[in-house]
Image (cartoon, rainbow, N blue to C red):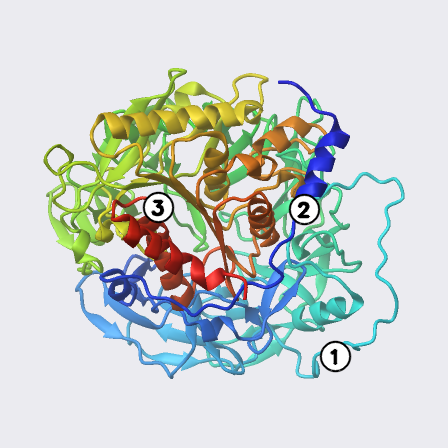
Amino acid sequence: MMKRPLNQLLGIFVSLVSVSVTPAMAQATWQQPPEPIASMLDTPWYPGVIISPNHQWLVQLHRPPLTSLSELAQPRLQLAGLQINPALRAPARAYAFVGLTIQSIQTGEQTTIELPQSAGIRNLSWSPTGNLLAFTLDQPDGVELWLADMATGQTQQLTGPTLNNTYGAPCRWISDEAGLLCKMVPPELGEPPIASPVPTGPRIEQNLGRTAPVRTYTNLLESPADEALFEHYLTSVLVRVSLQGDRTVLTPSQLIASMAPSPDGQWILLRTLQRPFSYQVPARLFPKRISVLDHDGQEVYRVADLPLADDIPVTFDSVRTGRRTIGWRSDRPATLYWVEALDGGDASQEVAQRDAVFQLPAPFQREPQPLWKTTLRYNDILWGNDTLALGVEAWYDTRRVRVWQLNPAAPEQPPILLDDRDYQDRYNDPGQPVTTPGPYHRRVLMLAPDNQSLYLRGRGASPEGVYPFLDRWQLTTQEKTRLWQAADPYYESVTVLLNNQATQLITHRESTEETPNYWRQDLVTGQQTALTDFADPRPWYRDLIPQVIRYERADGVLLSATLYLPPGHEPITDGPLPTLLWAYPQEFKSRDAASQVTTAENAFRRPYSYDPRFLLTQGYAVVMGPTMPIIGEGEVEPNDTYVQQLTQSAEAVVNYLIENGISRPDQLAIGGHSYGAFTAANLLAHTDLFQAGIANSGAYNRSLTPFGFQGEQRTFWEATDAYLDMSPFTHAANINEPLLLIHGANDENAGTYPIQSERLYGAMKGLGGTVRWVELPLEGHGYESREAVGHVLWEMERWLATYLKDGDRTTEDAHRQEVMAPSSTP
């Protein structure tokens, strides 16, 4: 590839950025999508489900309708990477349920929980035994703690609206007897500080030679006034709340990040945020103090004082230095464990060992005991008992994952390698170990009666399809025995094992026609009992049969996609349809892994929110998830040939659609959300395969994310050509097809600031392109309100109707005029 002088490239960027952009978009009214889409958006969705740890109770979580714009318009503070509802002291726009129904798994008897009118039910948490369920209610003036008794269906209010839910879970269970630990607003806190409208001076930041790269974060602190607000809203006291509602204050006011009672309930692991704050990174990277407190709230052991982590290298798998991933062993009454980097936290360093795991039992007076040293980056530990744990390590550059058998009681014994593979190789994924409540009611590995075998549940991807399974894994011989596997016509997976013989289980079953429901199964007798009977929220789609199509790229890589046609449509007899492809590429280090088919053909698929499959009701074909792997084997970086591979993938799927009579070459559109939007704009810039594009909440100028993005870990200055060649903004002059840009005005996602769409719109407008820019007030990276969701679907349908569907030229021109009118300059 010919390299261009950097000053010339920057000149291009400056000239394009300076293109005149309409100062303010004309205000349009909210539009409704055509029927039956509009009615579908108002149809309730089936409930969510949680199952108690003792397997006696199933609770249905009733979902709300799409939220209203007025709810999004509530006051919101954006501080240190957080979005806070100041009235509630809770996350802004937090998802909440609207009702609870208790069901006995044994008898099927149901009880609807009676609650006062509330804005939402959140923070659901089972008691250690599973007989009680704690949850919070959002009230106009704050968040309350409530309790439900499963056996009686009775509820009890434990606190007033005084919980502090601004950062992390507000409460954690100690035990069914001792109650919960909660973060509460200090009574003496007072009113929030009010910033002076008159600045006290300029904003100044400086760096005196220290290397401190950071990725692109949003909603950061910007002023001393922000710091004061952040401190005010995160300040809490730690309180023990009994099941009778009695409260014992354990700590003074401080910035409590999290608290974790030990499994035996005698100790508390407390994390607090410390100054200095930063204007460059979010709160999770602020200085932290981690301490162990006794039952009365007195510090007995200082685990760590971690400094501000604003200098973590941007190379993937880099981590902060010092003790991290600090927690309690779930199989012991009170044993701490943590991880420390052995490579300075810098993944670019060549070292023999990356991390060390340590453990320390109560009363925390011994020297910490080394347990395991990793060669890749620490990923997880699953605790079993004194002599069994599974350690997981992984490495992004090679996509390797390894699982080791550890002996916590004898760490001097060499670990035993159990699994070593490419984690993107789904065909050889052995599944995840099944866990169960242990002696302290925390999750531990479930052992078979021989105490030498575990159970694995996996997704079961294979060349024949996706069929989840349950295996028994004998650790000594490493032999696996298949105990159960889903079969056509169902996509069914194991949710819970009801005994350690694995003879009784609860599964989650669905098909293309059947709504997901829960079933109890006895593998000995073959008896199957339905536990739930949820209705199909979109019966229009019941006769629709998705088809996983397979085809080959020019370089030999096998690809796939899921094709949706309107019910009853047959391309051979009915002819081709205008077609929308909805894409999202992924980076791979292996051609074999990139070629695997991982889509479950038997899954229940119904559109929700602004899903493009709603357009099937309007006579379009929709191709979801056409695989567009970006492969870089060995030392080759995938993105060095991003455009070439992306183009080949698009050509392959388009050729398949045309050759099989599904689509016409002049009736194809490409679309996507986030990185998929970036993909859509790139394909319009580099190919003539599509007649229109739809790009939702994308990033189009990679110089605005200079310290890495998506799967790219090199900086702009290390890979300038890749950054610029991948940026649709660089190639805006080549986008000669109509492009619909949609973006939430409050997009909080790293890298996809609304300015990304604004600047691409300005570039295309200045260069004479056909482009429409829709900015959704109050919306974030994903769109939530009924008004915005309906309008987005209206925009998408009208755009495709204008530029894809056949029609009389007068009608098409009228459509174009109607579509373009709302954003015309006054």
Q: What residue do we see at 88% from left, 40% from top? A: 209
Front one among 663 and 465: 663
Front one among 211 and 715: 715
151 to 294, vertically: above or below = below
Q: Is residue 799 left or right of residue 342?
A: left
> Where residue 148 appears, x then y in whole percent?
37, 74
Quarter placement of the C terminus: bottom right
Q: Residues within 10 Å of mark 3 (few under 14, many from 20)?
A: many
714 to 729, vertically: above or below = above
**Mark carried by residue 194:** 1
> Where residue 87 appears, x then y in whole percent?
57, 78
Alpha-carbon distance for marks 3 and 2?
28 Å
Q: Mark 3 or 2 closer to N-term?
A: 2
Amino acid found under the numbered disc labelled 3: Tyr
Q: Residues within 10 Å of mark 2 (few under 14, many from 20)?
A: some
Front one among 54 and 287: 287
Callout in the foreground (2, 1): 2
**Mark carried by residue 803:** 3
Amino acid found under the numbered disc labelled 2: Val
Q: What residue do we see at 68% from left, 29% from top? A: 720
Amino acid found under the numbered disc labelled 1: Ile
Circle 3 sits in a helix, a strand or a loop, which is it? Answer: helix
**Mark carried by residue 391:** none
501 to 302, vertically: above or below = above
Quarter placement of the N terminus: top right
Q: What residue do we see at 74% from left, 47% from top? A: 310
